[in-house]
Amino acid sequence: MYYHHPADHTLVRVGDPSGHCPDGGLVLHFLGKRRAIEPVYKTNIQEVLEFETGHMLGVLEEVLPEHGLTVRPLGHFPAVKDTLDVADEDYYLGTFAITPDDDEVPRRDSTELFVQAHPGRVEGLPGGQYRYRDGRLEPLGEELIEPRHVIAINQGVYDRASFGISAVSRAAEPWLEYIELGTRLHHLQRTPGFGFMSSGYSSKTGHPLPAARRLDDLLAAAGLPSGASYFFLGGRVSAEQVASEGMREDAVHTKGPAEMIRDELARSLPDFMLPSRVLVLDALPLTANGKIDTKALAVSPEVTAARTAGPYVAPETPTEVRLAVTWGTALKYPDPADVSTEDNFFASGGNSLIAVALVNRINREYGTKLPLQALFEAPTLRELAARIDEAPTAPVSRLIPWPARAVSPRLLLARARRLSDEPATPRQPGRPGPPVLRRPGARHQRRRDPVRHHP
């Protein structure tokens, strides 16, 4: 048994034969190392490792025929893992045999392809979903896998793609489903003049991506069975792109889902309405009535982690220590002791309603008269505590200062007399209009009819 060193391209002996290799034969055992991809993929790790196995087999299918050889599946033997020096968390993925390339044994294509044409992007082909069979495209409907169903970092690619391809496994053996999907994508990626980008897939461990769920719905509507699936976007690429070894083509991937959502909001919202932070969750907790459970959401691990993502700075001054309790209560911190002086009110889940309640409570407890805008000007606990220490206890006037230029007392008297003589303009409730003017005692005066009646 030998290990292929991927960097040195050498074979390192690691043990005795597994017992699955015939005399004079050569077999390949594929094992996936969990820790190699876990920093990137939180779920569907086994599926991704099987896709990668399929890509490697695709390379072998290209180079082996030149030597009169080919690669074929031999079987799935989990006991092989016990003969190797690998971690318990790693995955045994399958065993394949290197055999003479016998053209008399045809290779069965166990994947079915569905093509979606983006409207106006493929000449002579109306937008819609098609089934590829016997070299022809059979229309299934106009519904598509949409940008919102695509992996977030590839949504920018969707706008530039001309079409999409969904590969659905029809493998007879379950262990081959995702491996053969990876092989099929590899061969499609080798098509001259075209580029493809993985944009969604199903899951054997219960975490299907939105593109796979959408595809299941489209196939069900067409009366077709679903299965393990792999969706990728496609379009023409230039010779320069094919030859490029730089990273410019990956520029679209430099932004994560939260950044992309914020950029999308920036197209339709003014700056002051943009959220300071966007937190992406797999699902929102719901109450028994199907409404969002805001209390459970506030104490969820994701929200708590996002709230404490910055460095923790303990409150020091008496005002900071006291305010931390009020702050933590208003924002529903699981433990007020977790409040940092660098926590931002809005990044910690604050909104305008909570802001009003917090400022009112501060004014009651500290005897201050802070206006609501103080929280917008000093959004961190440290800044707000400093504002409290500096705030006057007298009410802050909201009146507009009188102009600095001199005004004649005679002019003021004339304006006052004119206003007192003008009748109040009636105004319907809730509608804008000039203020109603009253003279002292007018509340109890009987309104007289301006028309005098004579007998």
Image (spheres, helix red, strand yellow):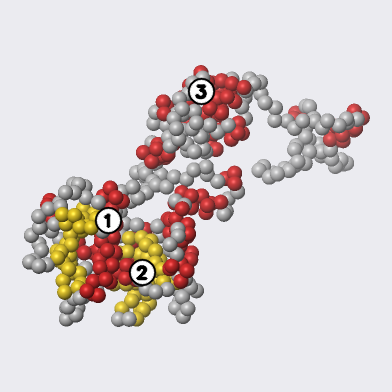
In which quadrant will I find the N terminus?
bottom left
At 88% across and 30% down in the image, what residue appears?
406
- For this rendering, which residue is in front, 188 or 328? 188
The reply to whether residue 340 is in sight is yes
Choose the circle earlier in sequence order: 3 or 1: 1
Give residue 392's quadrant in the image: top right
- For this rendering, which residue is in front, 445 or 146? 146
How far from the left and from the top, in percent, is residue 136? 34, 81
> Quick check: 87 left or right of 158?
left
Q: Nearer the viewer, mark 3 or mark 2?
A: 2
Query: Which type of secondary structure does the marked residue at label 2 adopt?
Result: helix
Residue denoted by label 1: 8
At 67% across and 42% down in the image, what residue appears?
429
Q: Amino acid at mark 3?
A: Glu
Choose the circle earlier in sequence order: 2 or 1: 1
Gap in Å between the C-alphas at discs 3 and 2? Answer: 59 Å
How far from the left and from the top, in percent, is residue 442? 78, 30
Specify few, some or many for label 1: CA neighbours under 10 Å numbering under 14, 14-19, or 20 or more. Answer: few
> Quick check: 452 left or right of 119?
right
Q: Is residue 412 above or below residue 40?
A: above
How far from the left and from the top, in percent, is residue 10? 23, 58
Q: Amino acid at mark 2?
A: Gln
> Quick check: 290 left or right of 410?
left
Q: Is residue 166 above or below residue 371?
A: below
Query: Which type of secondary structure does the marked residue at label 1 adopt?
Result: loop
Specify few, some or many for label 3: CA neighbours under 10 Å numbering under 14, 14-19, or 20 or more. Answer: many
Residue denoted by label 2: 189
Q: Amino acid at mark 1?
A: Asp
At 32% across and 67% down in the image, what residue appears?
185
Residue denoted by label 3: 320
